[in-house]
Image: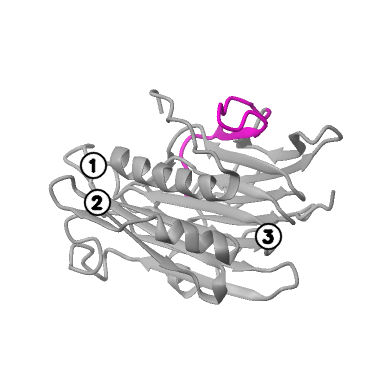
Amino acid sequence: MQRYYSDSPRVDFDSMPEMAPYLSQPDAMYVGCPGKHGYLNLGFVLDADGKSILRELDRRAPLIVQQELYFDEEMPGMPCVYILSSGGPNVDGDRYVQNFSVGPGAYAHISTGAATKLAEMKRNYSGMTQKIVLEEGAYLEYLPEPIIPCRHTRFICDTLMQVHPTATAFYSEIYMPGRKYYNGGEIFAYDILSVCTHAERPDGEQLFREKFIIDPTREDLRQIGVMHGFDVFANVVVVTPEDRAAEIYDATTPVYDPKAHIATGITHLPNSAGLLFKVLGNEPGPVKAAVREFCSRVRMAVKGVPIPKEFPWR
């Protein structure tokens, strides 16, 4: 199986204008030093018996993956992988690289063992790059737990998806406003979140690019058209064939329920690439439930089965 990563991966966002105020070295461990430069490569393929397996696993602390698990009752042949971290929350100067590849006809589910905490940062920032490669007929669900940015967090992430026209990638992110109930709350008290997601075909054809930069010090996130009365934000990208996208779109009804504090919306991505689904809420539980419900709708359209109920301890 072709490898999609570099032997010496680097994460460098210093040229991004939004990160210009945050380039000084941390007082303690320097940027990207051992223990602060996490790296993970996961490669899924079909074995000789047609079972989807985790064929490639390469990691560097503090990122940890032990092995694939097979507990999905609806798709018992699907390898489920949880990403863990031995280093606690992300701190200033952390750099992470994550590469996921799914071979022809293979399928996988990836999540995280817990929420990703972004600690308070005094000098630098935390950065992550991700590359997701899906070959012909591949299927991937990526449903990590929420990201929690603490006071004065600086975080930037760039995700590239390279998806074959016959493959389906379900990619989700959930962002908390901070630690809502810590020391009186720190809602939208982080410094900056910069998140970019873009996709292309294997031949390099560009499909779409979405980037949002959230700087609460420069813009009131409570205004109408931004977060207004909501706290939690989920962003879901589904890259899938056009006929599947149409089926999922027709089966999805936008929701605005002020009493339940939940709102959802859906739109088509450009170049017939797939769908963009967004959720707003006040607590992570209902937002996660809305994302999982939408993921189940996607899996029904692509694989013909729903996703199982979430574990009660998640």
User: Circle 2: is it few (<14), some (14-19), or many (20+) Cα within 10 Å?
Assistant: many
Magenta region, main secondary structure: loop
Q: Is residue 244 visible?
A: yes
**Disc sitting over residue 312 in the figure:** none
**C-beta proximity under 8 Å, tags 3 and 1:** no
Secondary structure beneath label 1: loop
- State the residue in front, 267 or 172: 267
**Disc sitting over residue 180 in the figure:** 1
The residue at the point 67 percent across, 51 percent down is 99
User: Circle 1: is it few (<14), some (14-19), or many (20+) Cα within 10 Å?
Assistant: some
Say which label, 1 or 2, has the lower sequence index. Answer: 1
The residue at the point 25 percent across, 49 percent down is 281
**C-beta proximity under 8 Å, tags 1 and 2:** yes
Task: Give the color scheme: rainbow, by chain, secondary structure or one colour.
Answer: one colour
Q: Is residue 209 left or right of residue 37?
A: left
Disc 3/disc 1 C-alpha distance (Å): 42 Å
Q: Is residue 195 left or right of residue 231?
A: right
Q: x%, y% of residue 160?
A: 61, 62
Instruction: Reply yes or no: does residue 82 show up in magenta.
Output: yes
- State the residue in front, 307 or 134: 307
Q: x%, y% of residue 77?
A: 67, 31
- Per the rendered image, the range of residues in magenta is 67-92
Instruction: Reply yes or no: does residue 113 show up in magenta.
Output: no
Q: Quadrant of the C terminus?
A: top left
Say which label, 3 or 2, has the lower sequence index. Answer: 3
**C-beta proximity under 8 Å, tags 3 and 2:** no
Secondary structure beneath label 2: loop
Residue type marked 2: Asp
Q: x%, y% of residue 60?
A: 69, 40
Secondary structure beneath label 3: loop
**Disc sitting over residue 166 in the figure:** 3
| Residue highlighted by disc 2 | 231
